[in-house]
């Protein structure tokens, strides 16, 4: 089993920055692709960003491309999401996820095996 714990959320103003962290523990050697998703009230969970295990390819949703940066510190078993130029539409609960298979679709939530509890990000206008 793998446990994921997100932190770093909060209330900020439009244009501000936040950095989310996701600390992984347990059988972290079994995880491959890792990603961030978000879910706003009344909406489905949507893909934000991911790192592929093979080749460390970075992938982003169009809505965050150029503003968000995903990174991974393997030595610390921690995944990060640097969020700059935040907009009110970025308001959501942000979730960290990990996949046991390196062949999954990194943008599809159902392909991930482990999830954190989420951290709230609220951006005021």
Image (cartoon, grey):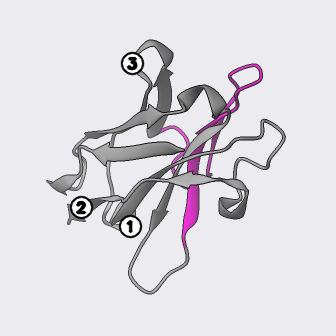
Give the magenta part as a residue range.
Answer: 45-66
Q: Position of residue 50 (x, y in %)?
A: 61, 40
Question: Which residue is at a point 36% across and 59% down the rendered structure image?
Answer: 118
In the picture as drawn, the residue positioned furthest to the bottom comes out as: 42
Q: Nearer the viewer, mark 1 or mark 3?
A: 3
Which numbered disc, 1 or 3, marks the residue that appears first in the sequence? 3
Q: Is residue 117 magenta?
A: no
Q: Quadrant of the C terminus?
A: bottom left
Please tell me which residue lies in front, 85 or 90.
Answer: 90
Cα–Cα gap, marks 1 and 2: 8 Å
**Residue position for label 2:** 123
Q: Nearer the viewer, mark 3 or mark 2?
A: 3
SS at mark 1 in the image: helix
Which numbered disc, 3 or 2, marks the residue that appears first in the sequence? 3
**Residue position for label 1:** 89
Q: Position of residue 55 (x, y in %)?
A: 75, 19
């Amino acid at each position: 089993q793998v446990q994921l714990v997100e932190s770093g959320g909060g209330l900020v103003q439009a244009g501000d920055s936040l950095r989310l962290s996701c600390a992984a523990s347990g059988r972290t050697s079994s995880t491959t692709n890792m990603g961030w998703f978000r879910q706003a009230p009344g909406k489905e969970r949507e893909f934000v960003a991911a790192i592929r295990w093979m080749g460390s390819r970075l992938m982003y949703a169009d809505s965050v491309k150029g503003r968000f940066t995903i990174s991974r510190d393997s030595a610390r078993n921690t995944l990060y999401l640097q969020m700059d130029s935040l907009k009110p539409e970025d308001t959501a609960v942000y979730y960290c996820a990990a996949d046991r298979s390196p062949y999954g679709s990194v943008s599809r939530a159902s392909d991930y095996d482990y999830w954190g509890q989420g951290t709230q990000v609220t951006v005021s206008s």
